[in-house]
Image: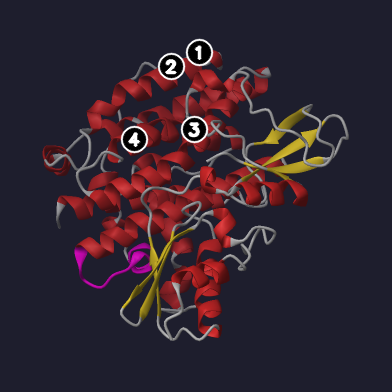
Amino acid sequence: MRAPVDEIWAWLSELPDPEIPVLSLTDLGVIRDVVWRGEVLEVTVTPTYSGCPATAVIEMDIEAALRRRGIARVVLRRQLSPPWTTGWITEEGREKLRAFGIAPPVAGTAASGRIAALAGARPEVACPRCGSPDTEEISRFGSTPCKAQWRCRACLEPFDYFKCH
Amino acid sequence: MTPLFELCLRMGDTTLILAQRVSEWCGHAPVLEEDIALANVALDLIGQTQLWLGLAGEVEGQGRDADALAFRRDAGAFRNLLLVERPNGDFGHTVMRQFLFDAWHLPMLRALAGSTEPRVAAIAQKAEREVAYHLERSADLVIRLGDGTPESRGRMQTALDALWPWAGEAFAGDAVDAALAAGGIAPDPASLRPAWNETVDSVLAEAMLSRPTGAFFHRGGRAGRHTEHLGHLLAEMQFLQRAYPGAEW
């Protein structure tokens, strides 16, 4: 069976990210390409962080979902370049993150390695719970590679911030 | 062995050994946030290792994958920088080692991102974003601990003095580097020195630490001549695959 590519994209948009299940794989922007090569369906996936353990699970989930839809021959291709960026998270995905309690990435604030930037500049992150901009970073690293730990000084709740990458 | 294969081993073995060292902290860090940060840095480095050693196996073409290269080679076949096999010491020592390494790693990856070998460039572009976070964290901690209490500053200066002779190896080129640089595959290691100096000098000044003056440095890791510490590290890291070859779960 050769399902139309648009329909396959729609199926993939129903698959949740294994670590942040409120996001679908298409919201996250990790599926690069879906193309038929003869009777074989080729799906190109890009990892978020190079060591992210979710990458292998994502690939298994894609393959299993497509088989359930009756596609017998699936090849998964892993593509590194150009590297994934949080800029590829869809607008809808960003809203889903916020509603789930994870502050979405603030564009243009990815780490640069510039030491001068260490002194003060932190992104302005609004608390996903109460909306207050009065927040502070606790740690640059969090429960998954893509997140940092933050705290709201207004409602006093800690929260996850999806780092700009 | 081709220069490209050597380059992949040098990068992948260095990230692997540092990842193993940093992983030794898991559950032992002074505060929870730092425990999590250390684990995240180790995870990034392991991910980069899979890419570098995966490419090494592909280039070699003998059927060895990243796992085979990581778990079934002895110390003499490893090509990591000696700096990363130094034992962890106290937390300050671990942070200082990470900083001296990150300050080299980031400009190295930025240079490799423009490699004429597209597979090298792709890995470097991917890793560069992760390592920018590593450098910001380690530099931030060096400053906070150096410009901290007399106790923390003393420990950071001790760590800096102890690690200094292990930092210079990264900039000492050999025939492999010359071949790689001639082909535009990798930079001349010495060309990374100015960027490293700039980062190290500005952070040490901010941290109220004194840059050691010694010019002597140990070398040999990139040619497979290691300190006694690597064998002990490998004995632990490789135990399972040595005892049960090919074991999976």
The alpha-carbon separation of the residues under discs 1 and 3 comes to 16 Å
Residue B161 showing in the rendered view: yes
Specify whether residue B67 is painted magenta.
yes
Q: Which mark is residue B205?
A: 1
Badge 1 or badge 3: first in the primary sequence: 3
Same subunit under labels 4 and 2? yes
Residues at circles 1 and 3 in contact by the CB criterion of under 8 Å: no
Looking at the image, residue B114 lies above or below residue B152: below
Specify whether residue B218 is painted magenta.
no
* Along the viewing direction, whichever of B108 and A36 lies nearer the viewer: A36
Q: Which residue is mark 2?
A: B201
Badge 1 or badge 4: first in the primary sequence: 4
Q: Is residue B172 left or right of residue B93?
A: left
Residue B82, x across and y down, in percent: 35, 42
Q: Residue at x 37, y 56 (%)?
A: B51
Residues at circles 1 and 2 in contact by the CB criterion of under 8 Å: yes
* Along the viewing direction, whichever of B111 and B147 lies nearer the viewer: B111
Range of magenta residues: B60-72
